[in-house]
Amino acid sequence: MKTITETNLPLKRVSSGKVREMYELDEDLLMVATDRLSAFDVVFSQGIPYKGIVLTEISKFWFDYLEGVVKSHIKSIDLPPELQNREEALERRAMRVLRATPIKLECVVRGYLVGSGWKEYQKSGSVCSIKLPAGLKQAQKLPEAIFTPSTKAEIGEHDMNVSEREGREIVGKEIYDDVREKSLAIYQKAADYALTKGIILADTKFEFGIYEDEIILIDEVLTPDSSRYWPASKYEEGTSPPSYDKQYVRDYVEKLGWDKKPPAPQLSDEVIKNTSEKYIECYERITGRKFER
């Protein structure tokens, strides 16, 4: 299958991120997920087959599932006639969404002690200024999920963790408390559901926006790009379990000795194929549906 790493639509482009491209569509936005891959905040030149489709379809599944928990920006996955049958094959990778004003926080929720959180805990006994009990192991489930937001960085820059005080200074106390409450509620509902499918949702990040004075969920949600999913059957405290996300690629390029600066190294055909399969397996496990190639 041809990968889609860029689009050129007959619409006004609003923005182009690491993976998604946004266009004006009447009073709304058209959000298109490409097959681009990024790791360590660097975008690779090679795409991952089906990745954009997986991200869009799994987001749609979760937006529907979370309908009673939080309002989202999604309006439709049906394309207007003028955008159908294009060579970019947008049908399964585009969403028409409300034009909300983004809130300048990455809303991260951690349910397990892993990744950068584990590294910080080993040094300080805390994660993002939140003190945790002593003696926790790598990948151990936390006594309760914690909200650890970060700044929303531009392309090529790194997100920076912020304390509760700093977060409230950035967006205001009322908005901070609202997105914190929403983030924890979404995480818990999603994590409970994922366990019924044999998957652990270790951590994830959300983005929110303001539309008509209401805070709504925007961007993608609970995808392998924004979340750390583990197969429950392979979970074991004290080790970093295999995951359905980009960790496979991160591990591969780190072994190459890459300095994590542009340009990104070339990925082998095997790594590209295996990464694609990981995304597809995640979709199928969570939704219970066969992925149509």
Image (tube, helix red, strand yellow):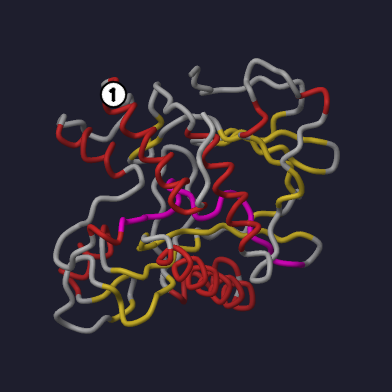
| Left or right of residue 157: residue 272 | left
Q: With respect to residue 133, does 210 lie above or below?
A: above
Range shown magenta:
214-231
How many numbered circles does the render carry?
1
Element on which disc 1 rests: loop
Q: Quadrant of residue 229?
A: bottom left
What residue is at 68 percent from the left and 64 percent from the top? 67
| Left or right of residue 238: residue 158 | right
Q: With respect to residue 15, does 143 lie above or below?
A: below
Picture coordinates of residue 49, whole percent (x, y): 45, 26
Which residue is disc 1 drawn over? 267
Is 251 part of what is drawn in magenta?
A: no
Q: Between residues 238 and 256, which one lies in front from this camera angle?
A: 238
Picture coordinates of residue 122, whole percent (x, y): 16, 69
Picture coordinates of residue 257, whole percent (x, y): 15, 31
Q: Between residues 201 and 219, which one lies in front from this camera angle?
A: 201
Q: With respect to residue 14, does 137 lie above or below?
A: below
What residue is at 57 percent from the left and 57 percent from the top? 207
Q: Between residues 93 and 255, which one lies in front from this camera angle?
A: 93
What residue is at 36 percent from the left and 63 percent from the top? 200
